[in-house]
Amino acid sequence: MSLFRRIFLLNAAGLTVATALLLGPVTVSTPILPGEVLVVVAGLAVLLVVNALVLRIGLAPLQRLGRAMATADLLHPGARAPVTGPAEVAGLITTYNTMLDRLETERATSSARALSAQEGERRRISQELHDEVGQTLTAVLLQLKRVADQVPGELREEVRQAQEATRGSLDEIRRIARRLRPGVLEELGLHSALRSLAAEFTTHGLSVRQHLDGDLPPLTEETELVVYRVAQEGLTNTARHAGADRAELRLRRVVGADGVELLVRDNGKGPGRLREGAGISGMRERALLIGAALSVGAGPGAGTDVRLCISTKSGASETGVSTTGASETGVPPQFRAATAFEGDR
């Protein structure tokens, strides 16, 4: 029965009873007697209780829909409002869920285009840094070397300092270019790229241990790039914000879940309750592109865990929206029984 009919019939029943009392032999004395007051109050109370129950039952699906709309987040896809209630309410909830499906698909498509353009821009900037700025600094370094052999002795120290500053700038330019475009990923593969990444952050006062399984299932180029970027962003956040001196970079095959799992863990101050910034949002966007799930939470004891769960099954969506759904922590159901790394317990 529709919500309209429920409310209409309830109101009609109340009005019918009131009309019957007016036309019937029942009368109210003047002044009103206590027994008559009790009957009137009891009837009114029954009518109000029944009306409240009908409205609560009929409007409960709308309240659930309101909560679902308030908590909807396209970076955490898959959550849908349950389709219940009268026909009108059920139709409204179905329309809302269909709208979410369309929005998630459109967002995944637009994110894929934006990130693809971003990677292209990274490659262009990296190439220009290497070819233009890098070569210019190399030429300056060579000129300073020739000048150093000709200047008087009292000026050689200043020229040497200029050489060191130029050499340091050249190394920094090369480092930035490598981060913008991971050439080692394209040339030597994911394992070598992750080892190089761990070594790079180890030189910045952070000890990074790496555990990389060698028997990973075949991964597409896009998936390898997402794994590398998530690891890069996770270690960057650790170095900048965590206040940690130790970190772990782990990549392994999850046999039971038929997938791959990346873990970046540190011993820092933990994620706390801070609002997610652009870095974590960017990682979630990348995870959605390959149908993966990203979770960021407290590690065992202290610190932060960044965990990327990737399913290698053919059922993953091409637009990057996972077809399996995810839990509140961002770990897909098929990974829950197989996500315990060594030392997690």
Image: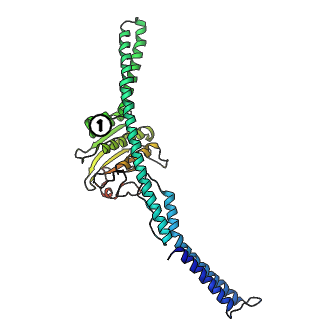
Residue 232, image quadrant: top left
Direction left: furthest residue: 215
Residue 175: percent from the left, percent from the top? 37, 29
Q: Residues within 10 Å of mark 1 (few under 14, many from 20)?
A: some
Find disc 1 in the rendering and name its residue: 185
Nearer the observer, 180 or 160: 180
In the image, residue 145 sits, relative to residue 335, either above or below, namely above
Residue 147 placement, left or right of 210:
right
Residue 170: percent from the left, percent from the top? 38, 23
Residue 154 visible? The answer is yes
Tell me which residue sits at (46%, 58%) in the image: 99
Nearer the observer, 340 or 10: 10
Residue 126: percent from the left, percent from the top? 37, 30
Nearer the observer, 186 or 327: 186
Element assignment for label 1: helix
In the image, residue 46 sits, relative to residue 191, either above or below, namely below
Nearer the observer, 103 or 193: 103
- The kind of residue tagged 1 is Leu
Tell me which residue sits at (71%, 88%) in the image: 34
Tell me which residue sits at (28%, 54%) in the image: 314
